Amino acid sequence: MIPRTRTLIVAAAGALTEYLATQFDAAGRIIQTAGATGPFAGIVQRAVPALGTVDVISGGPSEALTGAALTKGTHMALMCDATGRLIPFVAGAGNVQVAIWEPELLPANPGAAGISIRVFVTGHILAGA
């Protein structure tokens, strides 16, 4: 089966680092996400300068940066942190799951923040109490 990917081609409001989680600003440009409860557009695919055009994966396979250590079998669902990196999902009021970690692809157990991992971007899934 061929993986399906939803890709947006958009302008960045400011400079962005590759593989960060993003959202749209009021002008419709891409910015880094504001955290676990904010809106989610997708994962930016390469570093881009302010007002540059970039691909953003809004659904399907992508790379992403970790914001914390992950453990295989424990941290599969992911949400955004305030730096645009992905961290283990924690159910809570307004928290949004945005991706699922694919730990069978290397690295198997990233032990720190800032490690590139393979994820399946699910999009904005609101799951909280």
Image (spheres, rainbow, N blue to C red):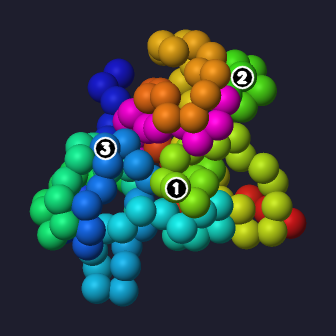
Circle 2 sits on which residue?
71
Q: Earlier in the sequence, mark 2 or mark 1?
A: 2
User: What's the residue at 64%, 61% (across, down)?
Assistant: 36
Q: Earlier in the sequence, mark 1 or mark 3?
A: 3
Q: Is residue 65 left or right of residue 35?
A: left
Identify whether 121 is placed above or below 24. above
Whole-angstrom CA distance, mark 1 to mark 3, is 12 Å
**Whether residue 63 is visible:** yes
The x and y percentages for residue 77 are 66, 39
Residue 83 numbered tag: 1
Whether tag 2 and tag 3 are in contact, CB under 8 A, the answer is no
User: What's the residue at 20%, 54% (across, down)?
Assistant: 48
Q: Residue furthest left?
A: 52
Q: Which residues fall within the magenta stretch? A: 59-69
Whether tag 1 and tag 3 are in contact, CB under 8 A, the answer is no
**Can you say which quadrant of the picture contains the N terminus?**
top left
At label 3, which amino acid type do we have?
Glu
Disc 3, SS: loop
**Residue 66 magenta-drawn?**
yes
User: What's the residue at 62%, 17% (across, down)?
Assistant: 109
Between 119 and 83, the one nearer to me in the picture: 83
Residue 18 numbered tag: 3
